[in-house]
Image: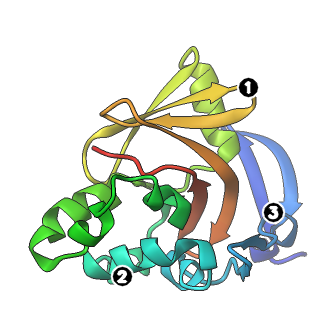
Amino acid sequence: MVPVSKFMIAALGGLVVAATPVSAFAQSKTVGGAEMVASKTIVENASQSADHTTLVAAVKAAGLVDTLNGKGPFTVFAPTNAAFALLPAGTVDTLLKPENKGTLTSILTYHVVPGKVTATQLVGKIKAGGGTAMLTTVQGETLKASLSGSNVVLIDAKGGQAMVTIADVPQSNGVVHVVDHVLLP
């Protein structure tokens, strides 16, 4: 008998759809020039990505390292450095100041959804919702997800949009989807 840990059973509504070796599902992906390793946590992997140095600095400034290194599972919509650069000049520097920790924490936790939501599951929720899915974030507010062609687009509380550019980056404590804009509650 093959050990259960070597297989992932994809299920939909309790119906077994396929049995796939974990190694086939959890293949590592390259993000920001670094291999993202499925056995590492969200923070451990993000710290290796050259495209996520601003995000990692923000997570540290907000005191969220232990949380995002925790058991989870979490789904993180991870903005790139280029996404942070799209914010008005001086915004990131202001947010990183200790006196703005609450605002920074609110913005960062708005990018996190409890549980592990893969791209396939998210698209399924969007289709089941008639073209939109509402995701409750760890911050407490909702993100709206929809499709633009075959791309998942997230719409924040202010109407801003972020497109998922790299989906399903496996982590030991969840999954990361790289996005091209910062989402604002």
Residue sticking out furthest to the left: 99
Q: Amino acid at mark 2?
A: Val
Q: Secondary structure at mark 2?
A: helix
Of the residues under marks 3 and 2, which one precedes in the sequence? 3
Q: Which one is nearer the viewer's eye here, 140 or 63?
A: 63
Question: Could you tell me the amino acid type at mark 1?
Answer: Gly
Tell me the number on the disc at residue 170.
none
Front residue (pair 76, 79): 79
> Which residue occupies the extreme front position in the image?
89
List the residue tagged with mark 3: 25
Q: Earlier in the sequence, mark 1 or mark 2?
A: 2
Few, some or many residues within 10 Å of mark 2 (<14, 14–19, 20+) = some
- The C terminus: image quadrant: top left
Up/down of 113 relative to 155, above or below = below
Numbered tag placed on residue 65 in the rendering: 2
- Callout 3, which amino acid? Phe
Residue density around tag 3, few if under 14, some if 14–19, many if 20 or more, within 10 Å: few
How packed is label 1: few (under 14 Cα within 10 Å), some, or many (20 or more)?
A: few
Residue 161 is situated, as x and y percent measured from the top left of the image, at 48, 36
Q: Which residue is mark 1?
A: 149
